[in-house]
Amino acid sequence: MDINQTEEQQVESIKRFWSDNGNAIIAGLTIGFAGFVGLNYYNDYKLQQELNTSEAYQTMIEVATEDRAAFAAAGKVFMAEHSASSYTMLTAIALAKEAAEKQDWVKAEAYLSTAIEKSVDDGIKAIAIVRLARVQLQLEQYEQALVTLSLKLPASFDASVEEIKGDIYFKQGKTGLARNAYQAAIDGATEGTNPALQMKLDDLAQVINLSE
């Protein structure tokens, strides 16, 4: 607006501007306000949903502490009702552990696969992958276990991966590959020598010597 315009001219300019653009401004403000309210409502709704899920998860954990037999049923219900929640990953891992303790390897495999699929944390996902490979070893799914171990994992899991590979190769009768894997696991260990792993390597050496 020209500062040299008279007051009357300025008023007329404002009237014309409002006449030409008023509806668009009102619409923009209305949409903007609605968006602001809607965004806050959405955020409040999401927060409440997360709080509800957290409370449901806490209740389920309390059930697990008091009654292990009821935990499996409660865990299944929780996963069905909160399938999009990050808590599903933790629940699936816990249910897999419960199944593995009962040597129900088929259920353990299914739960760990769910944990990997729903994972939102690389570290926890890596734990689920390693455990899945061990379960597949129990199921004698040797090739599938090797495929599982080929997934990208943090370097801190290298020793565990090599040890499981050694177990797989040993079961397959591939003693040379098993020895190399066990040795790689020992070399890659970050917390000193694992006595159980060293025993596996020593026992394998005896097997190889006897076969030669």
Image (tube, rainbow, N blue to C red):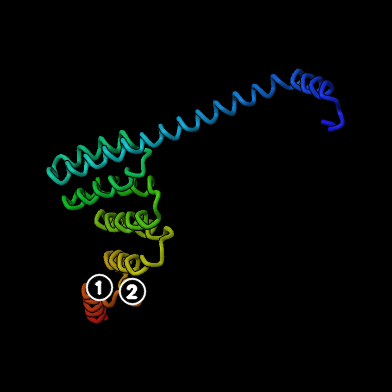
The residue carrying pointer 2 sits among few (fewer than 14), some (14 to 19) or many (20 or more) residues within 10 Å by Cα, namely: few
Q: Which quarter of the picture shows residue 196?
A: bottom left
Pinpoint residue 27: horizontal percent, then vertical percent: 64, 22
Q: In this view, does 151 lie above or below 192?
A: above
Which of the marked residues, 1 or 2, is nearer the chain's N terminus? 2
Asked if residue 102 lies left or right of residue 148, the reply is left
Please identify, in this view, whether the residue under mark 1 or under mark 2 is nearer the observer.
Answer: 2
SS of the residue at dot 1?
helix
- Name the residue tied to disc 2: 190
Q: Residue at x 34, y 72 (%)?
A: 181
> Which residue is situated farthest in the front direction here?
7
- Name the residue tied to disc 1: 197
SS of the residue at dot 2?
loop
Q: Which quarter of the picture shows residue 16?
A: top right
Q: Which of 172 and 63 is in front in this view?
A: 63
- Give amino acid for label 1: Leu
- Give amino acid for label 2: Thr
Q: Which residue is drawn at 76% across and 17% down?
A: 19
Labels in figure, total: 2
Gap in angstroms between the C-alphas marked 1 and 2: 13 Å
Q: Which quarter of the picture shows residue 210?
A: bottom left
Q: Which of 27 and 48 is in front in this view?
A: 27
